[in-house]
Amino acid sequence: SADTAMYHAKEGGRENFKFFKQEMNDRAVQRQSVEASLRLALERQEFVLYYQPKVNLRSGAIVGCEALIRWQHPERGLLSPEQFVSIAEDCGLILPIGRWVLREACLQALAWRQAGLRPIVVAVNTSALELRAMDFLENIRATLVETSMEPRYLELELTESVLMQDAESSNSALLALHDLGAKLALDDFGTGYSSLSYLRRFPIDTLKIDQSFVNHITSNKDDATIVCSVVSLGKSLNKRVIAEGVETQEQYEFLLAQECDEGQGFYLSRPVVAAALAALLQSGVSLPVYDGAA
Ligand code: C2E
Ligand code: MG
Ligand code: MG
Ligand code: MG
């Protein structure tokens, strides 16, 4: 962390500290240049959405998908959200980017319906800044109308830390969305603070068990216990429960045995481009029969 780095820098004396400052400086310069190219990327439409299926573990049917942003960078290739989303959040560009993501996902859902595919729930990730924006609710309403999307086919994924910031005003927007019929999912569940009180406070439909718990369910007893408890908690509270990061057949079978409703992960399918998701829907496959690890 920066603190530890600072400590070591001081320990090591002047030279190290100079080096440390230089490094911080480089990082700031790098962020500025990313920020500038993010602006251009919006104009030049360099962002793309990948879609990862959400699968009913019992039937193998695709019941939804999560839209995941990538940046097709002209020189650096396909960049993952880890490489630019936090910078976009820090400089506010996540607002126009988030509006693009929502509209693009809804337009894609419309295109799939127009191609005769059965409708599925499309989920988009929502940052704190977006939720707090004055036009958050109105923008969603307008986008749903523009893309003739029924609200029940839209799901917003929010993390606990997103809900933590400005919880009061967030809650009124989320209640309005809930009343409209849109769905809300608590992403990375179990990794943030106050998970349990949030379940009471916010109109949450779905719990997404974080992949860090799912990773070791077949080898670590504590992780297995946590996942089982979240599944039963979700069921008791009448919420859908989905496990993230399902990578192996053993994990899939474990979750199925625990009667977890849904799964998402490389074993079932990696995030894919829109045409590939359409092909999966078209073929009507049951995903768990595939060896997704290949
Ligand atoms: P997330 O919402 O928790 O998304 C799940 C991440 O786990 C995705 O990474 C997905 O590709 C990855 N994943 C899925 N299955 C597996 C698996 O079996 N194993 C492993 N190891 N990973 C798996 P991705 O696409 O790189 O996205 C990372 C994060 O970036 C997302 O985490 C989300 O927080 C954020 N993000 C992505 N798209 C958007 C967006 O449009 N807007 C905002 N604000 N954030 C986004
Ligand atoms: Mg998510
Ligand atoms: Mg997640
Ligand atoms: Mg995450």
Image: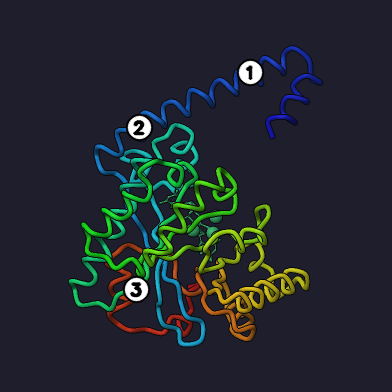
Mark 1 to mark 3 CA distance (whole Å): 50 Å
Where 266 falls versus 255 (above or below)? Answer: above
Asked where in the image residue 27 lies, by quadrant, the reply is top right
Q: Where is residue 69 in the image (x, y as percent from the top left)?
A: 39, 52
Q: What residue type is labelled 3?
A: Ile
Q: Where is residue 81 in the image (x, y as percent from the top left)?
A: 45, 47
Residue designated by label 1: 21
Q: Residue at the spot x=67%, y=14% of the render?
A: 18
Q: Residue at the spot x=55%, y=59% of the render?
A: 202
Asked where in the image residue 122 lies, by quadrant, the reply is bottom left
Q: Which mark is residue 37?
A: 2
Q: Disc 1 vs disc 3: which is toward the camera? A: 3
View extreme (left): residue: 114
**Circle 2 Cα neighbour tier, 10 Å, few/some/many (<14 / 14–19 / ≥20):** few
Q: Which amino acid does label 2 sit on?
A: Ser
Where 163 falls versus 215 (above or below)? Answer: above
